């Protein structure tokens, strides 16, 4: 049995965890600290499609400053009942992960750290935070990372820790089958309407982007939504699509010629993978941790912004316009392949313990 701890279940992880459960012959359990998305997420979790075992911990939330700390109960009892061969920890800022870490170390159960962040994709970087992360990783036998930047961050903290790459996965047959982009397609931003995601840069550059593309479409929700709505009423060619998911999201990709991802902090944005399997070139901000990996697989179809400025966003959008995405990326980022990498990491940790024993 492999047990994975996470704060919440994102919709795009369902197919991944279904595939992971299949790869582990059903010996997989996802432990969550909350059954539903956090209030700032409008996701719809397709629970009817879940084919893996899920356990939800009891607990309560504490609002501390601008953040929230969740205190979870029942970690020991849950792990005691499941008797895992290895435990995958999906966050060093999750209370339940530290409780699971203590339980596992007391019993000699191997730990796998799932680290998606990198040196430049988070706010808290310093002696104290890195000491905590160092302690977390030193308890682990191996690590799962999405790409090169996250691996470099792990190596900085735990140089000898083995790393297995498992990027975001895309389970969207309709998206993989859409036509190639039209030269008359729109520039599209899909994501949280926040400064972290660079939505303010899109607004500041909107008029110039509309000189390159016939339309600029912004989709999502977040603190900058009033600013988006206000500018939409004043700027012809700018469209606000609201929050989109499922078929609505696919239709938005169909209308696009380029996808804008000007994030200041973003470990591995799912929309980048979705764009590439849909053969849409992307504009990537300086805070996107997966930039080296995306450039490696997609080449010139990835236009990088040197800095987080409206001017660099416009220049990168100009570069990306009309660039072709390699057709082989239609089959990239499949859940089965990503799940196989995660299963290998988990089972390698478990087998290492059995060998020592």
Image (cartoon, rainbow, N blue to C red):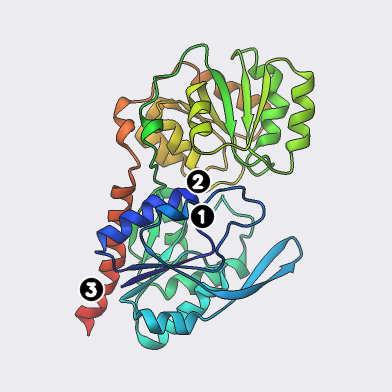
- 56 displayed left or right of 160: right
**Circles 2 and 1: CB distance less than 8 Å?**
yes
Label 2, label 1: how many angstroms apart (C-alpha)?
Answer: 7 Å
The local secondary structure at tag 3 comes to helix
**Residue drawn where x is 38% and y is 59% of the image:** 144
**Residue drawn where x is 57% and y is 39% of the image:** 286
Label 1, label 3: how many angstroms apart (C-alpha)?
Answer: 27 Å
The local secondary structure at tag 2 comes to loop
Q: Which of the pair 82/164 is nearer the observer?
A: 82
Instruction: Give the numbered dot on residue 351.
Output: 3
**Circles 1 and 3: CB distance less than 8 Å?**
no
Q: Which of the pair 300/348 is nearer the observer?
A: 348
The local secondary structure at tag 1 comes to loop
Give how far across and how far down residue 310 sits, in percent.
Answer: 68, 28
**Residue drawn where x is 53% and y is 42% of the image:** 288
User: Which residue does the numbered mark 2 point to in the structure image?
Assistant: 289
Residue 210 figure quarter: top right
Whether residue 305 is visible, yes or no, is no
Q: Is residue 33 above or below residue 304?
A: below
User: Which residue does the numbered mark 1 point to in the structure image?
Assistant: 117
Give how far across and how far down residue 209 sits, in percent.
Answer: 64, 19
């Amino acid at each position: 049995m492999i047990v994975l701890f996470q704060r919440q279940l994102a919709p795009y992880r369902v197919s991944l965890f279904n595939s992971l459960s299949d790869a582990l012959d059903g010996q997989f359990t996802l432990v969550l600290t909350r059954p539903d998305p956090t209030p700032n997420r409008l996701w719809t979790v397709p629970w009817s499609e879940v084919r893996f075992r899920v356990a939800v911990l009891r607990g309560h939330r504490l609002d501390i400053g601008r953040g929230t700390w969740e205190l979870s109960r029942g970690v020991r009892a849950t792990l005691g009942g499941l008797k895992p061969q290895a435990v995958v920890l999906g966050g060093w800022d999750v209370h339940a992960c530290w409780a699971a870490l203590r339980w596992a170390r007391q019993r000699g159960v191997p730990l796998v750290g799932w680290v998606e962040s990198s040196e430049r994709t988070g706010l808290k970087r310093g002696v104290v935070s890195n000491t905590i992360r160092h302690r977390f990783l030193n308890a682990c036998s191996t690590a799962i990372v999405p790409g090169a930047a996250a691996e470099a961050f792990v190596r900085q903290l735990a140089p000898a820790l083995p790393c297995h790459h498992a990027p975001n996965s895309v389970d969207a047959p309709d998206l993989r089958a859409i036509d190639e982009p039209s030269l008359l397609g729109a520039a599209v931003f899909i994501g949280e309407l926040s400064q972290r995601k660079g939505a303010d840069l899109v607004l500041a550059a909107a008029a110039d982007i509309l000189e390159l593309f016939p339309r600029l479409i912004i989709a999502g929700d977040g603190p900058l939504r009033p600013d988006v709505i206000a500018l939409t009423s004043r700027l012809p060619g700018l469209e606000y699509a609201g929050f989109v998911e499922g078929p609505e999201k696919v239709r938005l990709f169909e209308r696009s010629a380029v996808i804008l991802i000007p994030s200041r902090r973003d470990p591995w944005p799912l929309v980048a993978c979705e764009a590439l399997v849909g053969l849409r070139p992307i504009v990537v901000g300086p805070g996107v941790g997966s930039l080296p990996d995306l450039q490696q697989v997609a080449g010139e179809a990835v236009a990088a912004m040197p800095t987080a400025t409206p001017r660099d966003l416009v220049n990168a959008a100009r570069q990306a316009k009309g660039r072709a995405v390699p057709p082989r990326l239609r089959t990239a980022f499949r859940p089965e392949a990503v799940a196989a990498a995660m299963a290998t990491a988990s089972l390698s940790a478990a087998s290492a313990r059995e060998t020592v024993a």
